[in-house]
Image (cartoon, coloured by chain):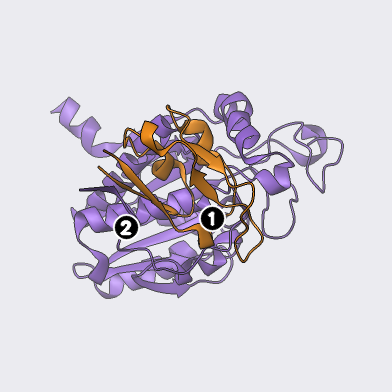
Chain colours: A purple, B orange
Amino acid sequence: MIVFQKPHALTDAPMHYCPGCTHGIVHRLVAEAIDALGIEGKTVGIAPVGCSVMAYNYFACDMIEAAHGRAPAVATGVKRSDPDGLVVFTYQGDGDLASIGMAETVHAAARNENITVIFINNAIYGMTGGQMAPTSLPGQVTQTSPYGRDVKACGYPVRVCEMLATLDGPEYLERVAVNNIKNIKAAGKAIRKAFQNQIDGKGFSLIEVISSCPTNWGMTPQKALEWIDEKMIPYYPLGVYKDRSAAKEENA
Amino acid sequence: MAKLTFKTEICKGCGLCINVCPKNVLELSKDKLNSKGHHPIEAARPDDCIGCAFCATMCPDCVITVER
């Protein structure tokens, strides 16, 4: 009996990510959710700009490449063209979603667009070589902050889930991590729920995945996973930040 | 009896699977290289495998298939 194999919704193309990059894990979790819900034939994914720019090579469903940061806007258009027939998700990094695409993200959430957003937060710009991102931690050393992020000059990191939770729009916001088995299982569950919400017509779901970047953090893959526990999770606490349906049930 | 199969050609040798294995089954190959130049993963102690699939859950590249 096969206990574990590559999900059907991933292609056979070898991924271009660096050794130990957790993008591959999140790709697989998304594919497993697509498989579990049996929606591969009607799913459209929107690839971002960033390390996961070539995500369209790896997902077996239909994929569209969006301009930098504009994935939620493209997803809005696709979803509105066939609201009942299509399942639309975007897969975006922090440089894409929290920097250049912040406006698109906030407004898609405020409109409660019925889409699923997978947001990879690794606190750095990976593809361009490790520059400081909006989500880089205070004091974090990057290519453009060699003495550590100075919050007086560069401001503070953006906590996307907390910020979006202040809006009335979004249906579901959760932050998960993929640095150990327990967190990966929880992340898979959250991603599946985000897709289920869309199928049920509930609205905007965003799953923020705390991810690692061993290459640009300058660590071994193992050390990078420990760094998530030590530094990232204390600043970006895991958990559900908004679940409107659950809140409604409680009030009922 | 659990059985592991590896797509060694796409393994990047990151070793994330080694650390999560509760039975210390896996090791990076010392004498093999794949075409990308990585030392791929292999089951050094296959008889100890309990088929928990932690390694496959952790692997970013879907290298490992687990049968039980």
Q: On the image, numbered disc 2 is attached to which residue?
A: A7
Q: Is residue A208 above or below residue B38?
A: above
Q: On the image, numbered disc 1 is attached to which residue?
A: B11
Please tell me how crowded label 1 is: few (under 14), some (14-19), or many (20+) other residues with Cα within 10 Å. Answer: many
Q: Position of residue A244 (x, y in %)?
A: 27, 38
Instruction: Pick out the residue farthest to the right.
Output: A147
Asked whether the viewer can see residue A113, the reply is no
Please tell me how crowded label 2 is: few (under 14), some (14-19), or many (20+) other residues with Cα within 10 Å. Answer: many
Asked whether the viewer can see residue A40, the reply is yes
Residue A6 horizontal side relative to residue A251, left or right: right
Which corner quadrant holds the C terminus of chain A?
top left
Residue B11 horizontal side relative to residue A153, left or right: left
Q: Position of residue A200 (x, y in %)?
A: 18, 53
Name the residue rendered at 25%, 55% in the picture: A198
Q: Chain of mark 1?
A: B
The amino acid beneath tag 2 is: Pro
Q: Position of residue A89 (x, y in %)?
A: 37, 60
Residue at mark 1 to residue at mark 2: CA–CA distance: 17 Å
Q: Position of residue A182 (x, y in %)?
A: 39, 30
Name the residue rendered at 23%, 68% in the picture: A83
